[in-house]
Amino acid sequence: MSYERLAYDDASTSTEMTADCRAVEAALVRAAVRPAPSIRYEDYPREVGKPTITVSEAAARLGAAVHLQLD
């Protein structure tokens, strides 16, 4: 089997990977001890506004260039 150089960076050092694993473990522990989100109807707002989508001038020009109608 011949060795080929990978198209991406080499793996991190074992010290860096260990630190990454410990950081992930700590984040998972914090997430595990948080209370679950409520499923009660009263805990959520009844009136939720629709999100607003804005179309920039550049996007409108691009849309017009490919014959899309942006209103």
Image (cartoon, rainbow, N blue to C red):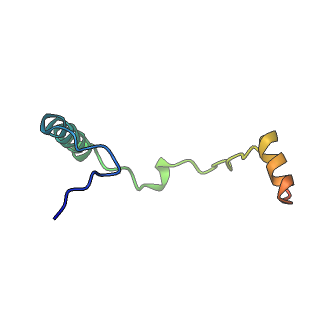
Judging depth in this view, the residue of 5 and 69 nearest the camera is 5
Q: Given the current orientation, which residue lies at the most extreme bottom position?
A: 1
Residue drawn at point x = 24 percent, y = 40 percent: 27
* Quadrant of the image occupied by residue 9: top left
Where in the figure is residue 54, as x and y percent of width and height?
75, 43
Where in the figure is residue 18, as x and y percent of width and height?
14, 39
Residue drawn at point x = 51 percent, y = 49 percent: 44
* Quadrant of the image occupied by residue 23: top left
Q: Is residue 71 visible?
A: no
Q: Is residue 37 visible?
A: yes
Judging depth in this view, the residue of 3 and 46 nearest the camera is 3
Judging depth in this view, the residue of 47 and 61 nearest the camera is 61
Residue drawn at point x = 16 percent, y = 65 percent: 1
23 left or right of 45? Answer: left
Where in the figure is residue 62, as x and y percent of width and height?
80, 50
17 left or right of 64? Answer: left
Q: Given the current orientation, which residue lies at the most extreme front position?
A: 2
Residue drawn at point x = 25 percent, y = 55 percent: 4
Relative to 55, residue 63 above or below = below
* Quadrant of the image occupied by residue 14: top left
